[in-house]
Image: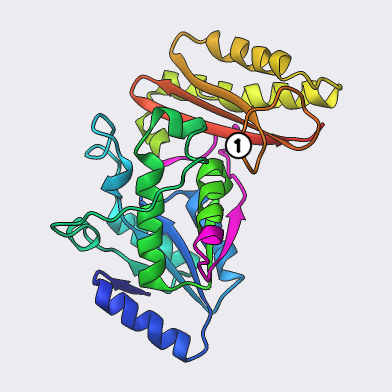
């Protein structure tokens, strides 16, 4: 496994691989890898000859009061896990390479970011679409895999790639959960033991709503109330949003008439958690 920190070296390698007819798969990460990340890498390997992943904590997607400095980092462990899962190249650029002095170019969508997480994190998706565009230009992948846990991010990347005619196939990787149902996230490391136990209310709420839909309920108001009741029974949980929306446009719906995304975001102390499920009436 090669570890490359230079943009020029990464671009040169990608050019060589393409000239040799090799197919490149790419999984971008911010490191502190868990089984959710590794599942994306395993999926990506099925679609290419060479697997590249990046480890870069992207400052452009963090707001002024968010956890950039505290975001967990574990480069040595990340490299070991990447090698074990079969990654061929790990790209590890520095901040000043990605955003050098005088940097002023950003990529931003008009509508999709104005839903869900984008409402409370106004710079978040502009930072993501910008860094993903740059990474695509550097790594030149044929296919890239993004996790369905970050459903809005996946929808935005797909829209950006389509709108800008980027020559890269975007695949969604299944949301991976802990054995007790908690969606895997690097930020789970922030949770205290009592918070970790109560964080299960997110997946439990989704289960309760799924079961109610299976019984024939289609009223979004009723389903939202069911989830809200279960979440707010824990005083440690502060709800950011409970959304039931169209999986493509992310527009809110009033009645389930087809596949509907239910997405949750809460904070517990200083930790923000998200989860989702597609409901099928």
Q: x and y percent of residue 89 in the render?
A: 38, 72
Q: Quadrant of the C terminus?
A: top right
Looking at the rendered structure, the number of numbered marks drawn on it comes to 1
179 drawn magenta: yes
According to the image, label 1 marks what residue?
Answer: 250
From this viewpoint, which residue is outermost toward the right? Answer: 216
Q: Is residue 62 left or right of residue 164?
A: left
Q: Please give the name of the residue rendered at 82% of the width and 20% of the height, measured from the top-left corner.
A: 217
Quick one: SS at disc 1? loop
Q: Is residue 48 left or right of residue 14?
A: right
Q: How is the image coloured?
A: rainbow
Q: Quadrant of the N terminus?
A: bottom left
Q: Mostly what secondary structure, the magenta segment?
A: loop
Q: Residues within 10 Å of mark 1 (few under 14, many from 20)?
A: many
Q: Please give the name of the residue rendered at 80% of the width and 22% of the height, measured from the top-left corner.
A: 218
Q: Is residue 73 visible?
A: no
* 142 and 174: which is toward the camera: 142
Q: Please give the name of the residue rendered at 24% of the width and 72% of the height, measured from the top-left corner.
A: 6
Q: Is residue 134 left or right of residue 199?
A: left
From this viewpoint, which residue is outermost toward the left? Answer: 101
Residue 247 lies, with reference to residue 253, above or below; the image says below
From this viewpoint, which residue is outermost toward the front? Answer: 110
Q: Which residues are magenta?
A: 161-186
Q: x and y percent of residue 47 in the render?
A: 60, 71
Residue 139 lies, with reference to residue 200, above or below; the image says below
Q: x and y percent of residue 168 in the render?
A: 53, 68
* 138 and 112: which is toward the camera: 112
23 drawn magenta: no
Q: Quadrant of residue 80?
A: bottom left
Q: Please give the name of the residue rendered at 30% of the width and 71% of the height, measured from the top-left corner.
A: 3
Q: x and y percent of residue 156 in the render?
A: 52, 48
């Amino acid at each position: 496994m090669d570890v490359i920190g230079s943009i020029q070296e990464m671009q040169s390698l990608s050019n060589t691989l393409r000239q040799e007819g090799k197919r490149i798969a790419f999984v971008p990460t911010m490191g502190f890898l868990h089984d959710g990340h590794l599942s994306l890498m395993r999926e990506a390997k099925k679609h290419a000859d060479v697997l590249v992943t990046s480890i870069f904590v992207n400052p452009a997607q963090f707001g002024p009061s968010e956890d950039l400095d505290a975001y967990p980092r574990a480069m040595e462990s990340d490299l070991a896990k990447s090698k074990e899962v079969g990654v061929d190249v790990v790209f590890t650029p520095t901040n000043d390479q990605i955003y050098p002095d005088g940097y002023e170019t950003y990529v931003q969508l008009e509508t999709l970011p104005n839903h869900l997480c984008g409402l409370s994190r106004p710079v978040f998706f502009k930072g993501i679409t910008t860094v993903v565009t740059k990474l695509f230009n550097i790594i030149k992948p044929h296919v890239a895999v993004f996790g369905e846990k970050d459903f809005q991010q996946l929808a935005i990347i797909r829209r950006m790639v389509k709108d800008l005619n980027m020559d890269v196939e975007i695949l969604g990787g299944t949301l991976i959960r802990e054995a007790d149902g908690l969606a895997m996230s690097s930020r789970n490391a922030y949770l205290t033991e009592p918070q970790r136990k109560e964080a299960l209310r997110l997946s439990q709420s989704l289960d309760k709503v799924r079961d109610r839909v299976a019984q024939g309920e289609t009223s979004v108001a009723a389903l939202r109330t069911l989830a809200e009741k279960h979440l707010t029974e824990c005083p440690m949980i502060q709800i950011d949003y409970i959304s039931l929306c169209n999986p493509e446009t992310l527009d809110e719906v009033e009645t389930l008439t087809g596949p509907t995304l239910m997405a949750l975001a809460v904070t517990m102390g200083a930790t923000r958690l998200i989860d989702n499920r597609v409901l099928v009436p």
